[in-house]
Amino acid sequence: MPRQTPIYYYSSTSGLVRSFAERLGRPAYNLAERAHRLSEVDGPWVLLTPSYKTGNPANDTIPEAVRRFLRSPVNRRSMVGVMGSGNRNFGTHYQMACREIAERSHRPVLFEFELAGTPWDVERAGQILADLDDALAAAHAD
Ligand SMILES: Cc1cc2nc3c(=O)[nH]c(=O)nc-3n(C[C@H](O)[C@H](O)[C@H](O)COP(=O)(O)O)c2cc1C
């Protein structure tokens, strides 16, 4: 079996993203925990982030823990894609954190879902990640 690309995610106390991440059946680390937030990843990994509109003039939506984790050049370099959880009620800000990080880092948005995701969302994301595991293993074998 190829290496399972780990997920690093941020989830607030409402825990919607954590619920999704824990159903993926692969290593998943919560950046709300300091030890994970300050760690450096030793290989390709995928970011899973909610968006949190702050209401301040800049209307930042990227969680501080995610920002902190991405301050590490090692982590920035080895991130291979981004997944997002959002809520369409936020209109033009829907998935803004996920999309902004993807654009700035030149990495693809791999999957987007609302709130904690449906069983179908979990299955689809699991398939995308399994395909990614295979592609990374093939690239590594070259
Ligand atoms: C204060 C607040 C602001 C939010 N802002 C956005 C937003 O700008 N865009 C978006 O798509 N979702 C937004 N959401 C929805 C959350 O990203 C979504 O519910 C996510 O699943 C929360 O994950 P968590 O419970 O793991 O923290 C917001 C939710 C809250 C409570």
Image (cartoon, helix red, strand yellow):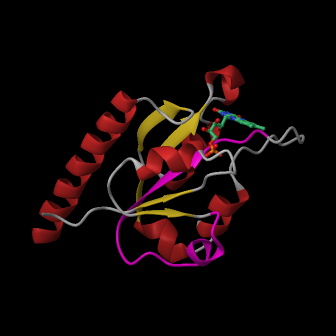
What span is in magenta? 32-53
x and y percentages locating residue 3 in the rendered image: 22, 67
The answer to whether any part of residue 96 appears in the image is yes
Most distant residue in the right direction: 57
40 up-or-down from 64: above or below? below
Residue 4, x across and y down, in percent: 27, 62
Q: Is residue 5 left or right of residue 16?
A: left
- Quadrant, the N terminus: bottom left
Q: Residue at x 82, y 42 (%)?
A: 54
Name the residue nearer the viewer: 103 or 67: 67
Q: Quadrant of the C terminus?
A: bottom left
Q: Is residue 142 visible to us here?
A: no
The reply to whether the magenta stretch includes residue 103 is: no
| Residue 73 placement: quadrant | bottom right
Name the residue: 17% across, 69% down.
Answer: 140
Circle count: 0
Question: Residue 101: percent from the left, percent from the top?
Answer: 57, 50
Q: Quadrant of ligand 1?
A: top right
